[in-house]
Image (spheres, helix red, strand yellow):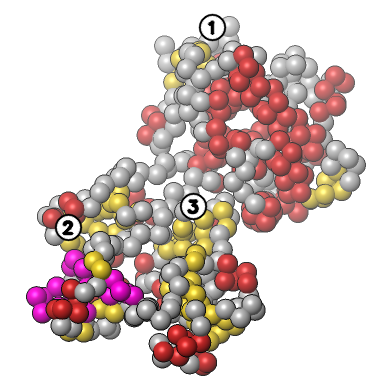
């Protein structure tokens, strides 16, 4: 049974208005859509559909932040009453379908997620599944698909058990769409780059509908925050560190201030932060000593915890019981294990030293890293005056790589205007001033460094996040 989306009806009306019914002209993707990053050959990636990238709590919070659907109690396929989030979560895990994709599909088909008061009609045909070309929604042949839970269930089943199976076994969907195989969609030649795009055209065989889906996805889920970005969510005021695609919440302003420069935080709406996966919170100020229920003690250093091997080591380093704070196992598990602190450990909280030859070093344990520019002292060691040490003591320390800029820093060469954001130890050039300001970065936080320093750092891809339209009403134009 073929399904038809509302975009087909819009297309027919459009054609009638321009006198083209029966002789439809080719559709042209608007220039602004291409400039904003829309690629009709790769609407979404496979993981966007088949990788679960949102937890239940994020899903629930997302729905509640958007519209009325998050407040409704609905009937699931087994007859039990559940929230919309519970139904979506069950289906997502049954078929290993990304909840984000289900949400985007609901919005694309019925504007269901953002509607403050969804109608029963919207709920009954939530994903547009089963509505055929030559029948109405009252056709008795499609009533088995009616209802919110049925719609979500059948849409997920269609993608996982039909489209994907067809692609893996036969090389194309029943509609003939396949990666690498040209197809004509609304007069435009489309060559799907992946299974996801082939499925999307099988489900909605029109450019406009998939452009609408892409815009929803960009607006909700493509929050491109480089690793190391500091975020203040608004209006909640919650503070986060972005790390490896997760948001890690600072437990308090004091915790954040002990680790980062609060002025470098950018403001991001709460509703966008909901779509980012939640990582472990950052619970303790830097250099705290925590005591967990099993008796172990750890020194917190940034995002790591270092086990203090015994009480003799604890006392030898000058720590006192007043320095110790209790912590739960869960709080401790939020930190990566670092090197143990034992009898051989020196300067576990780090020391900035200067050698007689003029070099400045960061010393930790029995290692040293050269500080390549004095601006690092202002950035990371404010208030610490380098301690002059004899050259032989410094030479005795193991030499590591020079001290690195932290992820999230903004830097530029003293000789050129290009601004970079540091991510994973590499420099990503920011494509334009508009993108820079659109991110909420501040120009006064850009650090100028010698060109030789910039050249010594590896470079990675340009930072140019897609700029989706504010809404979903993306119009196509006709051409000869």
Name the residue that disc number 3 marks.
Answer: 245
Q: Which residue is mark 2?
A: 453
Total label count? 3
Q: Which of pointers 2 and 3 lies earlier in the amino acid sequence? A: 3
Q: Residue at x 71, y 26 (%)?
A: 161
Q: Are marks 3 and 1 in contact (CB under 8 Å)?
A: no
**Which range of residues does the magenta coloring cover?**
353-373
Residue density around tag 2, few if under 14, some if 14–19, many if 20 or more, within 10 Å: few
Residues marked 2 and 3 touching at CB (< 8 Å): no
Name which quarter of the figure residue 28 lies in.
top left
- Mark 3 neighbour class, 10 Å CA radius: few under 14, some 14 to 19, many 20 or more: some
Q: Specify whether 280 is left or right of 127.
A: left
**Residue 78 appears in the figure:** yes
Image x and y of residue 480, in percent: 42, 11
Camera-side residue of 325 and 216: 325
Q: Is residue 321 above or below residue 34?
A: below
Q: Which residue is mark 1?
A: 23
Q: Secondary structure at mark 2?
A: helix
Residue 443, quarter of the rendered image: bottom left
Please give the name of the residue rendered at 66% of the width and 28% of the height, measured from the top-left corner.
159
């Amino acid at each position: 049974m073929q399904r038809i989306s509302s975009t087909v009806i819009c297309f027919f009306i459009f054609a009638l208005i321009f006198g083209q019914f029966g002789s439809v002209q080719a559709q042209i993707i608007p220039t602004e859509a291409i400039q904003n990053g829309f690629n009709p050959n790769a609407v979404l990636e496979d993981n966007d559909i088949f990788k679960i990238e949102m937890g239940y709590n994020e899903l629930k919070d997302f729905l509640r932040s958007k519209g009325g659907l998050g407040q409704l109690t609905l009937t699931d396929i087994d007859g039990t009453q559940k929230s919309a989030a519970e139904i979506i979560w069950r289906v997502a895990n049954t078929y290993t379908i990304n909840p984000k994709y289900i949400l985007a599909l609901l919005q694309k088909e019925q504007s269901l997620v953002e509607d403050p008061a969804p109608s029963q009609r919207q709920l009954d045909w939530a994903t547009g599944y089963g509505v055929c070309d030559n029948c109405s929604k009252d056709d008795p042949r499609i009533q088995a698909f009616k209802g919110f839970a049925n719609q979500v269930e059948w849409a997920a089943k269609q993608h996982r058990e039909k489209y994907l199976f067809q692609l893996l076994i036969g090389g194309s969907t029943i509609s003939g769409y396949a990666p690498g195989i040209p197809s004509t969609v609304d007069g435009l030649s489309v060559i799907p780059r992946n299974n996801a795009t082939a499925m999307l055209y099988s489900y909605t065989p029109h450019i406009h509908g998939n452009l609408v889906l892409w815009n929803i996805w960009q607006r909700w889920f493509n929050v491109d925050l480089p690793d190391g970005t500091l975020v203040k969510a608004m209006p909640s005021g919650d503070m986060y560190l972005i790390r490896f695609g997760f948001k890690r919440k600072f437990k308090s302003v004091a915790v954040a201030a002990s680790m980062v420069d609060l002025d470098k935080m950018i403001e991001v709406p709460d509703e966008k932060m909901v779509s980012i996966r939640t990582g472990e919170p950052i619970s303790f100020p830097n250099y705290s000593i925590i005591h967990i229920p099993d008796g172990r003690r750890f020194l917190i250093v940034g995002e790591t915890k270092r086990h203090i091997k015994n009480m003799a080591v604890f006392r030898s380093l000058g720590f006192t019981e007043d320095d110790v704070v209790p912590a739960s196992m869960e709080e401790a598990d939020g930190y990566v294990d670092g090197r143990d602190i034992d009898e051989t450990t020196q300067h576990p909280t780090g020391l900035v030293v200067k050698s007689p030859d003029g070099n400045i070093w960061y010393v930790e344990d029995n290692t040293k890293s050269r500080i390549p520019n004095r601006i690092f002292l202002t950035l990371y060691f404010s208030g610490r005056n380098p301690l002059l040490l004899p050259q032989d003591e410094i030479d005795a320390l193991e030499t590591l790589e020079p001290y690195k800029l932290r992820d999230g820093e903004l830097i530029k060469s003293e000789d050129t205007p290009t601004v970079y954001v540091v991510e994973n130890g590499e420099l990503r050039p920011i494509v334009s001033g508009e993108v820079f300001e659109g991110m909420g970065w501040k120009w006064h936080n850009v650090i100028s460094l010698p060109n030789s320093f910039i050249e010594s750092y590896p470079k990675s891809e340009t930072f140019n996040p897609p700029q989706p339209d504010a809404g979903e009403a993306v119009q196509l134009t006709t051409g000869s």
